[in-house]
């Protein structure tokens, strides 16, 4: 799903890699959607470059630095994770209007599909590890301030929405915002919810099968937040899998009421992507089932 900016991002990452001393003869795009993932062939290095984030390069760089720091820390604790490339400095690079980070290239094991049920179980171990992370993290950054800013950009012309849909989304956010705007508000509303450093973007899904085992990846949304956010939007059987594993490992269980709030926050976060779909061919089609599910569900998904 190549965006208009993908070729420019690939060339920018190749040029930046060469300036860092890497041999780059043929940058190969491995994946692109919200970010381009470019193998700087033949070097064992991958560049990841956000394509459609509504952030300045400096803001994107701050976000990437947090991701690099956390991934390196997880690696140093013995966690199975895609680590920052040891061949270049562990910092983001700005070039040609892009902000990029550099990662060790790992060979995907294409003989097997990712096991998302097992990924859900492994999320418990990741949460146990991240609970000890000593660095400073922002509060619930995938939701606040991202969702309220995006709500202002929704219009009746937004793909897959209508004036009624925009009104509903904003009214639902008005219900949710007081609950998740601060850590104190969340913990007051959901005292049984475990708040700690979390992956921030579906750790059960962002896994890479390799010959050396399954690796966690994509920590770009690393944040301080409720563990329920990392399971937001999954089918009930996945939350049951998580809770069974958490009980076996002596870890906190998902709080049912907090999960309802996290699920709604996730739905609104995805709706907030809709204004960007003209930049991403095919994205509207991919999001259509989610929008239909949201529209057919109860207002505020049971929070009122």
Image (cartoon, rainbow, N blue to C red):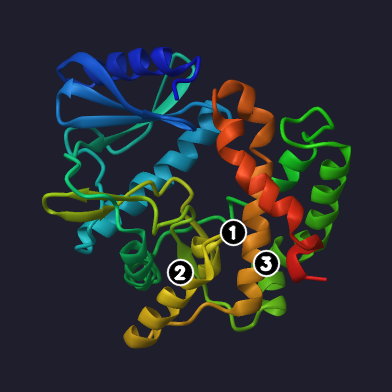
213 left or right of 195? left
> Which residue lies at the image location 31% right of the left edge and 65% below the top edge?
118
Residue 75: where, in percent of width, then height? 23, 56
**Inter-mark Cα distance, 1 to 3:** 16 Å
242 left or right of 178? left
10 Å neighbourhood of mark 3: few (<14), some, or many (≥20)? many
106 left or right of 131? left
Q: How many marks?
A: 3
Figure quadrant of residue 95: top left
Q: Nearer the viewer, mark 2 or mark 3?
A: 2
**Inter-mark Cα distance, 2 to 3:** 17 Å
Res. 54 visible in picture = no
> Which residue lies at the image location 48% right of the left edge and 52% below the top edge?
201
Q: Check if mark 1's residue and mark 3's residue have beta carbons within 8 Å.
A: no
Disc number at residue 139? 1
Asked which secondary structure carries label 1, the reply is loop
Asked which secondary structure carries label 2, the reply is helix
Picture layout, residue 231 above or below residue 192? above
What residue does disc 2 label? 238
First along the sequence among labels 2 and 3: 2
Disc number at residue 261? 3
In the picture, which quadrant includes the C terminus? bottom right
Q: Nearer the viewer, mark 1 or mark 3?
A: 3
> Which residue lies at the image location 15% right of the left edge and 31% below the top edge?
44
10 Å neighbourhood of mark 1: few (<14), some, or many (≥20)? many
Res. 291 visible in picture = yes
In the picture, which quadrant includes the N terminus? top left
């Amino acid at each position: 799903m190549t965006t208009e900016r993908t070729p420019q991002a690939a060339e920018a990452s190749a040029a930046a890699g060469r300036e860092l001393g890497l041999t780059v003869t043929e940058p190969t795009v491995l994946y692109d959607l919200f970010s381009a993932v470019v193998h700087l062939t033949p070097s064992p290095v991958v560049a990841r470059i956000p394509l459609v984030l509504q952030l300045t390069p400096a803001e994107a760089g701050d976000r990437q630095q947090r991701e690099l720091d956390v991934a390196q820390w997880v690696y140093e604790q013995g966690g199975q994770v895609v680590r920052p490339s040891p061949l270049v400095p562990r910092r983001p690079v700005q070039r040609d209007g892009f902000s990029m980070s550099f990662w060790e290239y790992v060979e995907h094991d294409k003989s097997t599909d990712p096991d998302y049920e097992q990924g859900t179980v492994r999320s418990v171990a990741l949460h146990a590890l991240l609970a000890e992370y000593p660095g400073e993290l922002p509060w619930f950054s995938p939701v606040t301030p991202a969702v309220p800013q995006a709500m202002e950009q929704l219009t009746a012309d937004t793909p897959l929405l209508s004036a009624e849909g925009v009104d509903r989304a904003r009214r639902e956010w008005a219900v949710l915002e007081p609950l998740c705007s601060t850590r104190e508000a969340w913990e007051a509303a959901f005292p049984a919810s475990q708040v700690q450093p979390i992956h921030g973007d579906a750790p059960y899904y962002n896994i890479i099968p390799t010959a050396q085992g399954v690796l966690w990846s994509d920590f770009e949304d690393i944040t301080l937040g409720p563990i329920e956010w990392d399971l937001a939007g999954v089918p009930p059987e996945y939350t049951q899998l998580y809770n069974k594993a958490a009980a076996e490992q002596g870890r906190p269980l998902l709080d049912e009421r907090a999960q309802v709030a996290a699920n709604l926050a996730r739905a609104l976060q995805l709706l907030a992507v809709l204004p960007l779909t003209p930049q991403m061919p095919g994205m509207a089609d991919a999001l259509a089932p989610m929008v239909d599910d949201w529209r057919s569900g109860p207002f505020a998904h049971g929070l009122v």
